[in-house]
Amino acid sequence: MDWSKTKTIFIIVFSILNVFLYSLYIDRYTEAEQIQPLPESTIDEKLRGDNITYSALPDSSEDKPYVRGESKAFTETAVDIDGVVNVLDGRMLQITYDEPIELDGDKEDALGAFIEKEVPESSEYSLWQIDEDQNHAVFFQKISGVPLFHSKGGQLTVFWNEDDKVIGFEQTLFDNIIENEEQKKLISPLESIHTLYQKSLLKTNSRITEAELGYSTHVQVSENRQMFVPTWRIRVKDSEGEETDLYVNAIKDGVIELNKQNEETAE
């Protein structure tokens, strides 16, 4: 065999193959560049076609920054109670009362009065959900005045017994909150709805009942420090009346799948 001729043939064949593959790549890249996202008018038409409706949506003209926070370190002297005080990993305060505290009147008002009196830095929280079946209520920490959605590091859970008496609570909190200097333009709630629709997350005959701006965990900066991103919470009610919360990054317009365990804790 003439090796030099064989080598020349291989070189020619591979050169032709490279040219073919490159031309194929260019064609595919050009096609991808020509693909445009559906215009909003088209998405609105599709929403109407699938009978997906929404009520009045909040304004989104105000810019918001990324925010950083550090897990607060609790001590067993954080509260003065007749009961048991535990601190888990230095970051979660657990309280169990010797004598349960009665919740009088309307549950929401009674819980508000309870945490104002009993919980350290109670003004940092807002009520998320009261679960009468499981006898507990979940409060989310507020970051820059809006809720921090489903974060184990910024949450208060109050527990009561069958006699509607508080038996204790668990608390975590972020402090040393720092807002980034750069303000970011937010996408609108309607754009978030469009994003959810394009991701096939909205069912036919459903209705958007609420849109709320908050924050969610973006990245873990260090062991006890996290960065939070502005987030739209979109509440959807399907044709059977079941409600679901979906979350969209309010800066980068991507769906956020919050930790399922955190969601189940809050539900």
Image (spheres, grey):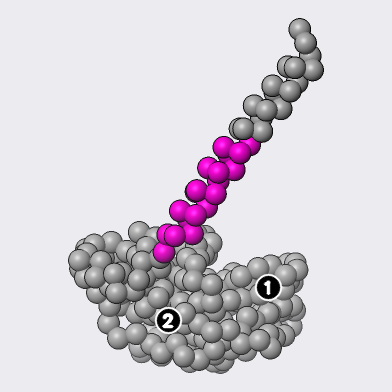
Residue at the location (34% across, 74% down)?
A: 40
Asked if residue 12 lies in the magenta stretch, the reply is no
Q: Position of residue 51 (x, y in %)?
A: 20, 68
Q: Nearer the viewer, residue 60 or 35?
A: 35
Residue 254 vs residue 231, the one in the foreground:
254
Q: Which mark is residue 256?
A: none
Quadrant position of residue 21: top right
Residue 155 against residue 65 in the figure, above or below? above
Kind of residue indicated by mark 1:
Gln
Quick check: 26 left or right of 193? right
Residue at numbered disc 2: 188
Tell me if 25 is positioned left or right of 70 in this view: left
Q: Which residue occupies 37% across, 78% down? A: 190
SS for dot 1:
strand
Q: Position of residue 13 (x, y in %)?
A: 64, 26
The front one of 243 and 232 is: 232
Q: Position of residue 42 (x, y in %)?
A: 29, 69
Task: Provide the residue designation for mark 1.
Answer: 226
The magenta stretch is 18-36
Mark 2 and mark 1 lie on one chain; the one further toward the N terminus is 2
- Category of crowding for the residue at label 2, using alpha-carbon neighbours closer than 10 angstroms: few (below 14), some (14–19), many (at least 20): many
- Element type at marker 2? loop
